[in-house]
Amino acid sequence: MESKEFKALKEQLLSCRRNGFDRMDAAERSAMESYCTDYKAFLDTSKTERLCAGEVVRLAKQAGYRPYVRGAAVKPGDKVYLCNRGKSVLLAHIGEKPLAEGVQIAAAHIDSPRLDLKPNPLYEDGELAYFKTHYYGGIRKYQWVTIPLELHGVVALRDGASVQVNIGGGADDPRLVITDLLPHLGAEQNKKPLAEAIPAETLNLLLGSEPIGDAEESGRVKLAVMKLLNEKYGITEDDFTSAELEAVPAVKATDIGLDRSMIGAYGHDDRVCAYAALRALLDLEGTPAKTAVCVLADKEEIGSDGVTGMQSAAFDTFMEDLCESQGAAVRVCFEKSFCLSADVTAAYDPNFSDVYEKRNAAYLNYGIGLCKYTGARGKSGASDADAETVACIRNLFDEAGVIWQIAELGKVDAGGGGTVAMYMANRNITTLDAGVPVLSMHAPFETVSKLDCYETYKGMKAVFQAEK
């Protein structure tokens, strides 16, 4: 076989994925940079699920969305949203086709791994004041020590009022920190497995060291800290009982690499997909053929349970209300709908190549990563999309010029992870996982490719604009 014929046959029959930068022109690169600048600003204002939901609502209103009122009629072109208890948001752009013909859904989550305060968090030891924490989601505890932290959340008072707390978010604010053992005394700690070297009960936030009152009194530093909190927020120690306060990294989103091709930040998982889904919805021009729905859920990192999680009936209720306004049955709508479960996947990291299977790994700069299934071991906890669904999205993305790849999370039996996909699929909604590949996933500082962020946005937009 001649070389020319061989090359032609190879091109015809064999897969040849290319780095996205080899496929992107100057105009696309400019659009990518603009999109990522907006995304970084979104991240910096969305450090917690409450802050993120608030920013989503602000952007939605700015784009012409109005709060959905149960019983209100909806017609093609209407833009509505529902904020669920301040921690998740549901949005819909009503399409030309009736809801009985199904909707196009992008579902992401806006919670991220963090440290929550315990119900009785404040204490003093060694004349230092601390907050006790309980970690939320799958963290590697050693990564959270000796880094600057912020505290955000709400304190709900007995009279029904709520106090917004922000410690460390301002440029001149003090930060909090969790201390670690000095290496000079760490001989025994060094012998412990990585998961045990930092016990969860030592993840205590250092608050202060300056005492008040007479030297003979006890608890002087604790009282001094409580006095400061009372002066700023009007709260007492008992009010922590009804508080939701979250410690998150005190870091801003920033370009990574000498070429500025990547973004480093806290909370890429999964706000990178949440922003892509939201922005794609808000950027739709005209009225879509099918109703476009964006679901930004809470509690995914701990199983999607609870009233603001994807297993909650909140989504079903929102969709049922919309369907009833058009005389449609929600079960009929669901069985004709499609959902892109928009969650991040693991990017191949050469430093830890032994846990990846190279032929089926997601790579930075190769675009949005499709995942036919997630889960662990024998696909436990996965919806496992059928071949027809993957083929449909392949074709949709190719027609829309979306750069994409298909991947697994890592080697079989190396671990695993889940998304909201199975909860959507369990509703009889055709579902496929897709999202941005991430380096250092679940760390206080994660890294993603700008190209992959932008291509994920393009993928979401293609789904919302699909007519079938």
Image (cartoon, rainbow, N blue to C red):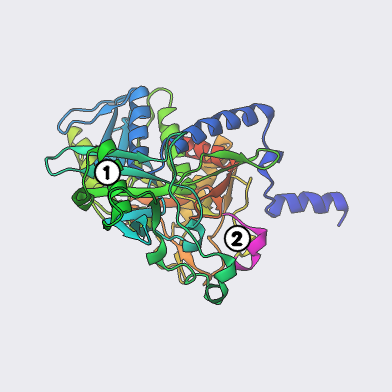
Across and down, in percent, residue 367 comes to 59, 44
Q: Amino acid at mark 2?
A: Asn
* Quarter placement of the C terminus: top left
- Residue that appears at 85% across and 49% down: 4
Please report the residue visible at 27 percent of the width from the left and 43 percent of the height from the top.
227
Look at label 1 and name its amino acid: Lys
Q: Residues within 10 Å of mark 1 (few under 14, many from 20)?
A: some
For the point 55% across and 55% down, the residue is 440
Extreme residue toward the right, this view: 2
Gap between marks 1 and 2, in whole Å? 56 Å
Q: Is residue 349 magenta?
A: yes
Q: Is residue 331 visible?
A: no
Tag of residue 227:
1
List x then y, in percent, for residue 378: 46, 71
Q: Is residue 178 magenta?
A: no
Tag 1, which secondary structure? helix
The residue that disc 2 covers is 360
Q: Position of residue 176 (x, y in %)?
A: 43, 48
Q: Residue 331 or 347: which is nearer the viewer? A: 347
Q: Nearer the viewer, residue 96 or 297?
A: 297
Q: Is residue 133 left or right of residue 28?
A: left
* Closer mark to the observer between disc 1 and disc 2: 1
Question: Mark 2: which secondary structure?
Answer: helix
Of residue 299 and residue 91, the one placed in the foreground of this image is 299
Q: Quadrant of the N terminus?
A: bottom right
Look at the image and give the residue range highlighted in magenta: 347-355
Kindly indicate the quadrant of the structure image that contains residue 14.
Answer: bottom right
Say left or right for 418 vs 413.
Answer: left
- Pick whichever, 225 or 171, lies toward us: 225
